[in-house]
Amino acid sequence: MFRAGRSVWAAMRPAAGATVRLGITAEKVAELGLTRASAFVDLAALESITLPGRPFAMVEGPSGIAQLESPLAGLVTARNLELMDDPGRLADSAECVDSGWLVELDVDDDAAVVRQELEGL
């Protein structure tokens, strides 16, 4: 897992080519005051294109709202629908690659190039 600033993490999916999951850091979840009962998530649409520095998700908690910016360009191929139905799960598993991810991107580069780019974050 790689951190892109204080708010976003990125993780390569094993054996999935150049597929990357993006999520919110536990630090940002704590800053927003997210709890199991008090959280809201809005995610980029399927098949939309993300660009570095552009929002891919919005997360709202009792202490504020965060627009999360993508560290990479890519095509949104999956959204974590379980989190959209129960965003309070982020309070417990924000940095869990299997359950705390927000969107999954298909990145157009070779997997080695993507890994190198993530290591540079």
Image (cartoon, rainbow, N blue to C red):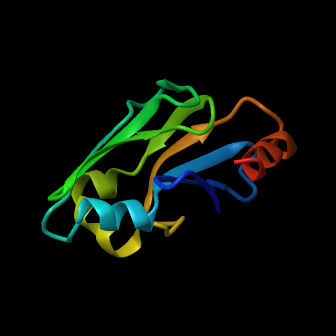
Q: Residue furthest bottom?
A: 92
In the rendered image, residue 62, in percent from the top left (x then y), is placed at: 14, 59
Q: Nearer the viewer, residue 53 or 23?
A: 53
**Quadrant of the image containing the N terminus:** bottom right
In the rendered image, residue 67, in percent from the top left (x then y), is placed at: 35, 39
Residue at coordinates 49% horizontally, 69% vertically from top-left? 96
Instruction: Decide: is 100 above or below 22.
Output: below
Instruction: Decide: is 4 above or below 92.
Output: above
Residue at coordinates 83% horizontally, 46% vertically from top-left? 116
Task: Give the quarter of the image for residue 88.
Answer: bottom left
Q: In the image, 30: left or right of 118?
A: left
Q: Nearer the viewer, residue 115 or 106?
A: 115
Instruction: Decide: is 2 above or below 48.
Output: below
Q: In the image, 118: left or right of 8?
A: right
In the rendered image, residue 94, in percent from the top left (x then y), is placed at: 41, 66
Task: Give the quarter of the image for residue 32.
Answer: bottom left
Instruction: Decide: is 24 above or below 94.
Output: above
In the rendered image, residue 53, in percent from the top left (x then y), is placed at: 53, 31
Residue at coordinates 76% horizontally, 56% vertically from top-left? 15
How many badges with numbers are in the image?
A: 0
Residue at coordinates 23% horizontally, 65% vertically from top-left? 33
Q: In the image, 30: left or right of 60?
A: right
